Amino acid sequence: MQVEFATLPSVSFEERRHLPQESAIYFVTDPGGAVLYIGKSVDIRQRWATHHLLPRLKPMSGLRIAWLVPDQARSLVSIESDLIRDLDPPLNVVGAPTTKRLPRLADVAVGLMLRLPADLNADLKAWAKEDGRSLSNLIVHLLKRAVMSRPSPDTTPSPPA
Amino acid sequence: MEKKTVNLNVRMPADLHDRVKQQASRDMRSLNLEVLWLLERGLESVKSADEPERKQADAG
């Protein structure tokens, strides 16, 4: 099942109280847009009032919750299971969580303390504002673009002898 | 005079953190300096990409 995440409505994790009181599939995404968790509920706002992942997600910044109101012809359960199978989000654990080790938060996201020159910080902030994204999200986006444009050391050919 | 700096905590996917760390070690820079270098390059590329559009807009 293909989902165009860019077109889905979403709120920041901090604004989860503004989720609609609707029956939907929801997606938790990290600052880089990767899907960390997929769930379903007949009232997603209510679901996020008491979600079991809250204590693990609260320390993370830049998360978003997007949702998809499915076609009535298909059940939430079947759509959710198809999406989990296709996207394999790291926080969706198959089976009873009490008998399986949950992935640690550190396996998914890592905190990095940066010291930026004030002028660069101001430029980035202005850019983030213009793009309508958080500063953290912009930094992750730029870093991703930069490292992906450079070949990994494993694929770099050795210089001629 | 020392340049004013700002501390910022950024959370990123673990695999991206690993890639930047590897790159920093390859370039013999600290992780912070590598990130700064990459961010400055990112900003420059966007500014230079904007330049022709701006010139076109000025001409139009």
Image (cartoon, coloured by chain):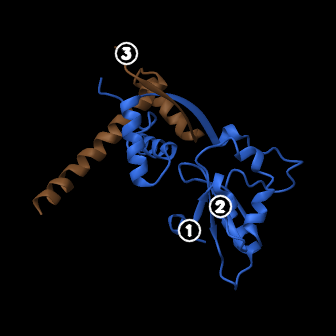
Residue A150 in view, yes or no = no
Residue farthest to the right, as pictured: A98
Q: Residue at label 2?
A: A27
Instruction: Report whether mark 3 lies on the same chain as mark 2.
Output: no
Ranked by sequence position, the earlier of labels 2 and 1 is 1
Q: Quadrant of residue A85?
A: bottom right
What's the residue at 69%, 41% (across, down)?
A59
Q: What distance separates the C-alpha of mark 2 from that of mark 1?
A: 10 Å
Is A101 left, or right, of A120 in this rendering? right
Q: Up-down: is B54 above or below A41?
A: above
- Which is closer to the viewer, label 3 or label 2? 3
The residue that appears at 46% across and 41% down in the rendered structure is A139
On-image quarter of the N terminus of chain A: bottom right
Three-letter code, disc 3: Glu
Q: CA distance from mark 3 to mark 2?
A: 45 Å
The color chain A is rendered in:
blue
Same chain for marks 2 and 1?
Answer: yes
Residue A68 appears at what percent x and percent y?
A: 63, 71
Query: What is the chain letter for disc 2?
Result: A
Residue of label 1:
A8
Q: Amino acid at mark 1?
A: Leu
Q: Are marks 3 and 2 in contact (CB under 8 Å)?
A: no
Question: What's under tag 2, amino acid-wise?
Answer: Phe
Q: Colour of chain B?
A: brown
**CB under 8 Å between discs 2 and 1:** yes
